[in-house]
Image (tube, helix red, strand yellow):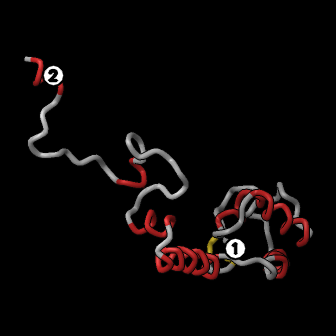
Amino acid sequence: MARILGVDLPRNKSMKIAIRAIYGIGPKISEEVLKKAGIENTKSSNDITDEDVKQIRQALEGYTLEGDLRRDIAMNIKRLKDLNCYRGTRHRKSLPVRGQRTHTNARTRKGPAVAIAGKKSIKSLKS
């Protein structure tokens, strides 16, 4: 099993998919890195050698990945919160940041719906 930047690559997958297990690597960067390293996209992650792993590590040197990228993103969000700007207040309140509606939906960001005590449904008011 190959280990790159502290991440174990998944077994039995093509390298263009397996390398995406590293935080910050998507489809485009995975193809660029494998091209720089001289490794085929379709090569299985089980078949890579230590030499291939070294070449991939060298190809990844120019990118911000894993812990550094997570830290940068967290610092950017913290800066928005400290500025007290609109986006920062939305982050602080755990609400959608990019203009989505919140009257309905937004359950992923807001969490499960909480019933309001004493509120009657429309059906019970008609009877």
Q: Which residue is mark 2?
A: 123
Pinpoint residue 77: horizontal percent, then vertical percent: 53, 73
Relative to 22, 126 lies left or right: left
Relative to 75, 112 lies left or right: left
Considering only vertical position in the picture, is 90 above or below 59?
above
Mark-to-mark CA distance, 1 and 2: 60 Å
Which residue reaches farthest top?
127
Pinpoint residue 117: horizontal percent, then vertical percent: 11, 45
Q: Residue at x 90, y 65 (%)?
A: 35
Pinpoint residue 46: horizontal percent, then vertical percent: 73, 64
Label 2 is placed on what type of residue?
Lys
Mark 1 closeness class: few <14, some 14–19, many ≥20 residues within 10 Å:
some
Q: Residue at x 46, y 74 (%)?
A: 84
Mark 2 closeness class: few <14, some 14–19, many ≥20 residues within 10 Å:
few
Which is nearer the eye, 44 or 21?
21
Disc 1 is placed on an element classified as loop
When asked about the image quadrant of residue 5, the answer is: bottom right
Which quadrant would the C terminus be assigned to in this image?
top left
- Tally of numbered tags: 2
Q: Which residue is mark 1?
A: 2
Disc 1 or 2, which lies upstream in sequence? 1
Pinpoint residue 109: horizontal percent, then vertical percent: 42, 55
Q: Residue at x 59, y 74 (%)?
A: 73
